[in-house]
Image (tube, grey):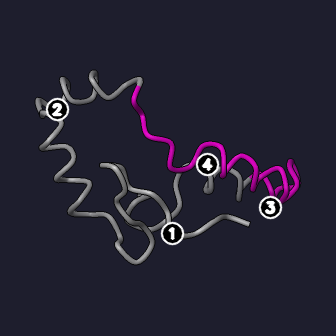
Amino acid sequence: MYLKFGFGRATQDAGIEIRRGAMTREQGVNLVRLYDGEFPDEHLKTYLSYYEMNYSEFDAVLDRWANRELFEKLHGRWRPRFTVS
């Protein structure tokens, strides 16, 4: 979702918490900057094993769905062209 639309789970959850008054927008922005777009290095091996994929197959899927207007690939990783403010 993050690479395709430019927002992820942290944005969704922060938006809900901001609307219900449980956090300020500033707190939400800080959480989004910290967690959205974080690459799951720690769990990647487990994920690839579960889906019976190798890293090049996984990377090809990311490349296929990444929104090139929002992201650019630098040093093998997709990086946002935008900042959350």
* Mark 3 Cα shell of 10 Å, populated few (<14), some (14-19), many (≥20): few
Above or below — where is 41 with respect to 37? Answer: above
Q: Amino acid at mark 1?
A: Arg
Earlier sequence position, callout 1 versus callout 2: 2
Give yes or no for residue 28 being in the magenta stretch. yes
- Mark 4 falls on what kind of element? helix
x, y percent for residue 21: 88, 55
Q: Give the magenta part as a residue range.
A: 17-41
Earlier sequence position, callout 1 versus callout 4: 4
x, y percent for residue 72: 38, 65
Q: Amino acid at mark 4?
A: Ala
Q: CA distance from mark 1 to mark 2?
A: 30 Å
Earlier sequence position, callout 4 versus callout 3: 4
Q: Of tags 1 and 4, which is closer to the observer?
A: 1
Q: Amino acid at mark 3?
A: Arg
Label 4: which residue?
10
- Mark 1 falls on what kind of element? loop
Residue 64 figure quarter? bottom left
Dominant secondary structure (helix, strand or loop) of the stretch shown in magenta: helix
Q: Is residue 85 left or right of residue 26?
A: left
Earlier sequence position, callout 3 versus callout 1: 3
Label 3: which residue?
19
Q: Of tags 3 and 1, which is closer to the observer?
A: 1
Q: Is residue 11 left or right of residue 44?
A: right
Q: CA distance from mark 4 to mark 2?
A: 24 Å
Quadrant location, the N terminus: bottom left
Q: Is residue 36 left or right of residue 72?
A: right
